Amino acid sequence: MKGLFISLNCFFIAAQFVVLHVYRNYIGGYKMKGFCSLIFVLLGIVNLVYCLVNKKDGVLFPLLITCGLIFGMTADVVLNFNFIAGAAIFAAGHLLYFGAFLVLNKMQVKDLAALLCILALSLTLVLLPIYDYGSKLMFIIVIVYTLIISLMLSKALMNAVSTGKAMEIILFIGCLLFYVSDFMLLLSIFSGEKNFASTVCCYTYWPGQLIIAFSLYFYQGKTVI
């Protein structure tokens, strides 16, 4: 049984990069983009099932992560038609990830210190004079989103530092790539830089989500007797 799930993980990881290459170089459009995102969702579902099959308790964590992946896939498609709605769905996905991280480790004072540091960096990045947000509403949306993604990333970082476990470290790497992709998206949409930023966004976002989905395979929930 374990061999089956390892094989499925390898298959979806390989498929993600093949489809991403096709999307970037041959077949664009929101349908192909959605299909590309569907792959990391399927990987998350596979590893959620792996947790259930192995009778691991505490399934709230992998369930929240899987829901976050589904929100990400949905936001990918919606973003093509309405940026604000897409950003709202992405933000909800980040909050699901943050909630999952709290299931692993409750919020502590040192987590707040990490949040302040990452938030300071994030605000510095979004307040650079290279952006033209077009309206006060869009500016407020970007600031709120920045707070949410900083909250998610800082908790992922502190979980990895506090436990040193493989899953938390893998999760942090995935979240960090997601974080980078979001700022590349800002560059692509609200600044004059589009080609480079769009490329980096794609090659950090999908691998980031894929890594988050893959991390569930290493979930060490207690076995129900």
Image: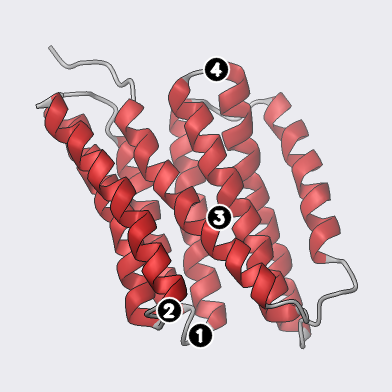
Q: Residue at x 43, y 43 (%)?
A: 212
For disc 3, the marked residue is 204
Q: What kind of element bears circle 3?
A: helix
Which residue has dot 2 on it? Answer: 78
The tag earlier along the polypeptide, 3 or 4, is 4
Q: Give the Cα separation between the discs numbered 3 and 2.
A: 19 Å
Does 155 appear above or below 201? above
Label 2 amino acid?
Val
Query: What amino acid type is highlighted by mark number 3?
Result: Thr
Q: Marks 1 and 4, Cα distance to the nearest angstrom?
A: 39 Å
In depth, the one of 150 and 41 nearer the eye is 41
Query: Disc 1 or disc 4, which is closer to the eye?
Result: 4
**x and y percentages locating residue 37 in the rendered image:** 36, 63
Q: CA distance from mark 2 to mark 4?
A: 36 Å
Mark positioned earlier in the residue sequence (3 or 1): 1
**Pick the front one: 194 or 216:** 194
Q: Which residue is mark 1?
A: 82
Which residue, as the protein is rendered here, is positioned at the far right?
129
Determine the CA span between mark 3 and mark 4: 23 Å
> Which of the image's four quarters has the C terminus?
top left
Classed neighbour count for the residue bearing mark 2: other residues with Cα under 10 Å, few (<14), some (14–19), many (≥20): many
Mark earlier in primary sequence (2, 4): 2
Q: Specify whether 176 is left or right of 225.
A: right
Q: Quadrant of residue 91?
A: bottom right
**What amino acid type is highlighted by mark number 1?**
Asn
Give the residue type that dot 4 points to. Answer: Gly
At x 47%, y 83%, the residue is 80
Does the CB distance between marks 1 and 2 fall below 8 Å?
yes
Position of the N terminus, as image quadrant, is top left
Point out which mark residue 218 bears: none
